[in-house]
Amino acid sequence: MRIKLMCLILAVQSCLMPYQTEVHQVITDEAFHLLKSFFPGVELSELGIQLGQIGNYGERQWQNGDVLTGAFREDLEDVVWGYGPESSFPITWLFVSSPTATPTHFWVADNGDDYETPNVGYPWGGTFPNAYQKTIKFIYGGWKLLFLESGSAYIKEYKYNSLIDLAKTGIVQQTGYYNVFPGDYVALNPPQTITLSENLRKRFVYEILGRVLHLLQDMSVPAHVHGDAHPDLSSLLFLPCFGASFCEQSDQYENALTQEFVENSWDWVDALNAGGLL
C-alpha cells in the first residue's frame, strides 16, 4: 500500500507544476484524488481525515497536524537541522545557519547516499545534508522534535523510534526541554517515555508525512537532483540585496512547468491518462 501511494504521487507530480510552496499542497492533494480512484473509501480513513486543505498551513509547525500543512511548511522551516530564518530551534536568532530553510532539499544520488549538497546559491558557507538523509531522519527517527504548546513556557524535546511506530503507538522519549526565556536547556537523564495524546500523535505523524512527500516531490525536479540550489533571498529583510543576482534566483524548469500548469489546468486525471501507476 505504501509503495503504491509513493508511485501515485510520482505519477501526479510528473504532470503538475513544480514546486513553489503552495504547489506542494496541490500535488499532494491531487495524488490523494488519484489514490481514491484505486482505493475507494480511503477518504474515510485516518489518512483521509488528516489530509488537510489547500491554503491552510497554520502559523507554525505542529499546529494543524495534517499532511498538506507538512507539504507546505517544509519550505518554511527546517525542523530537523534548524536551517532558515523561521527555524523551529529555540532562540531562533542565535541558531540560524542559512538564509533559507531549503538547502536540505537536494540530493545528487549518483554521488552516494551521504553526499552533502555543496553551497551553490547561498551566501553562507558550508555544505548541507541531502534530501535522502533528511527523509531517513523523518521515517526512522534520530532527530530532535521540538514542540512548543500554545501558552507554554517550555519547548519540549522529543525523539521517536520510527514514524510507523509513532503512528501506531504514539510513544516518544522526552530527552529534555528548553525554557523559552532565558532559553536554557535542561536534559532529562534518563529520558522519560511518554504516550502522546491522540491529538498530538496525529499532529506529529501527518505533518511529518507531508514533509516527506514534499522532499519526494522535489526529487522530480532536475535542479534538485543536480545540486543546483536556487534560493529566493529577496524576502530576507536583513539582507541588503541592492540588485545582487543571488538575491532572486529561480529555476527555469519550475517556472516553465508552473506556466504550463496554469494554462492547462492539469490534475490527477491527466496524470492517470499520461501513464497511470509507475
Image (cartoon, rainbow, N blue to C red):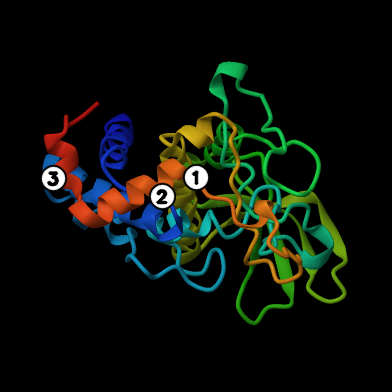
Earlier-in-chain disc, 1 versus 3: 1
Q: Are marks 1 and 3 in contact (CB under 8 Å)?
A: no
The disc at residue 251 is 1
Q: Which residue is mark 2?
A: 255
Three-letter code for the amino acid on which mark 2 is drawn: Asn
Q: Where is residue 175 shown, x and y percent of the image?
A: 74, 52
Q: Where is residue 177 shown, x and y percent of the image?
A: 77, 62
Asked whether residue 211 is in view, the answer is: yes
Asked which secondary structure carries label 3, the reply is helix
Q: Nearer the viewer, residue 44 or 100?
A: 100
- Point 55% across, 42% down: residue: 138
Locate the C terminus and report the quarter of the image it occupies.
top left
Horizontal side, residue 153 vs residue 256: left or right: right
Classify residue 188 by image quadrant.
Answer: bottom right
Three-letter code for the amino acid on which mark 3 is drawn: Val
- Point 83% across, 55% down: residue: 187
The disc at residue 157 is none
Neighbour tally class for label 1: few under 14, some 14-19, many 20 plus, Cα within 10 Å: some
Locate the N terminus and report the quarter of the image it occupies.
top left
Q: Where is residue 8 shown, x and y percent of the image?
A: 26, 37
Neighbour tally class for label 2: few under 14, some 14-19, many 20 plus, Cα within 10 Å: some
Asked which secondary structure carries label 1, the reply is loop
Asked which secondary structure carries label 2, the reply is helix
Q: CA distance from mark 2 to mark 3?
A: 22 Å
Earlier-in-chain disc, 2 versus 3: 2
Q: CA distance from mark 1 to mark 3?
A: 26 Å
Q: Which residue is mark 3?
A: 269
Three-letter code for the amino acid on which mark 1 is drawn: Asp
Horizontal side, residue 101 vs residue 184: left or right: left
Horizontal side, residue 119 vs residue 219: left or right: right
Q: Are marks 1 and 2 in contact (CB under 8 Å)?
A: yes
